[in-house]
Image (cartoon, helix red, strand yellow):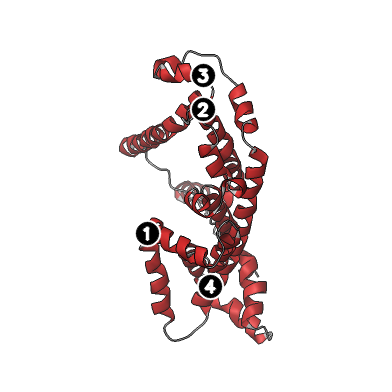
Amino acid sequence: MSTTVNSAVGAITPPLVDESPTATPRRPRRRYDPSANRAGIGVYAAVVIAAAIFLVPFLYIVLVALATPAQVSGGAFSLLQFDPQWQNFVEAVTRINWLHYAKNSLFLSVIVSVLTTFSSALVGFAFARLRGRGKNALFTIILATMMIPSIATLIPTYILFARLGLVNTYWPWVLWGIAGTPYLIFLFRQFFTAIPLELEDAAIMDGAGWWRIFWQVFLPLSRPMILTSLILTFTWTWGDYLAPALLLNYNNTTLAVATSIGYLDPRGSGIITLQSAGALIYILPVIVIFLFTQRYFMGSGISSGVKG
């Protein structure tokens, strides 16, 4: 009789649950939601359509760069039926002193990106960590300058540099780099504000001053932000056309200006096939840089400083 009772009790008793800390909790099974699946497909389709729309101008430039002037004048249908003219790229490089202008563009882009990143990081650190009267008002004024169109300050900038005797020199770009940019100052300020206060207090207890705190504590933690700033500033300077066209002569100008006015026929009209081929070669370094560094954009390096 006892055996029967025990077996019955064992049959109705639920199995013991492993409540140890190492037990892995079971995840609840998700129910299939057709509406959510349709919404995801709709979003994906919208992204694909938007990407295709943005790729149309780039594909058109590629087709024109590989065509002849006669095929370009024949319309879009004529562009789809041709043999690639790879010599257009060779002529685009040899028709102008491409290497000389590329060196000028690279020099200005590197100088401006390095100086702008350092100065913006320093100013952003001051706004994020230092205390003083009028700090918020001054930061607001700096942000307000972002609403001023750059074209509105172009002529006053030229007059200023002309009176200083800096036209046809690279000094304006050096001064722009030292001055920093409001956008990057804002980004660095927001980045440094998110860093825990304990790191700053620990450095102060070790006898570090503000410069040492910035250089040895905050700056190493901001490597993703530094890389983002370098890439953005390099791209802005590499693609700038107005400033080199206004402040530099044709001999020491950048590749942006040279590719715009260097491919002309005897009548002074632009050769569109060479201009398209030169434009593709011109934007290639920026595309390569973006493809290799996109995953580092705005990554957070704070966790490396708070690990125990």
- Depth check, mark 2 against mark 4: the one in front is 2
The answer to which of 145 and 262 lies nearer the viewer is 262
- The CA distance from mark 2 to mark 4 is 49 Å
Q: Is residue 212 above or below residue 84?
A: below
The residue singled out by tag 3 in the image is: 68
The disc, 4 or 1, on the residue closer to the chain's N-terminal end is 4
In which image quadrant can residue 95 be found? top right
Instruction: Answer whether residue 67 is visible to the viewer in this image.
Output: yes
- Packing grade of label 3 (10 A; few <14, some 14-19, many >=20) is many
- Packing grade of label 4 (10 A; few <14, some 14-19, many >=20) is many
Q: Are marks 1 and 2 in contact (CB under 8 Å)?
A: no
As shown in the figure, which amino acid type bears the numbered disc 3? Thr
- The CA distance from mark 1 to mark 3 is 40 Å
In which image quadrant can residue 144 be found? bottom left
- Depth check, mark 4 against mark 3: the one in front is 3
120 left or right of 159 in image: right
Q: Is residue 135 above or below residue 103?
A: below
As shown in the figure, which amino acid type bears the numbered disc 1? Ala
| Residue 130 image point, x, y percent | 52, 81
- Depth check, mark 4 against mark 1: the one in front is 1
| Residue 230 image point, x, y percent | 59, 56
Residue at the image point whose x is 54% and y is 28% from the top: 274
As shown in the figure, which amino acid type bears the numbered disc 4? Val
- The CA distance from mark 4 to mark 3 is 52 Å
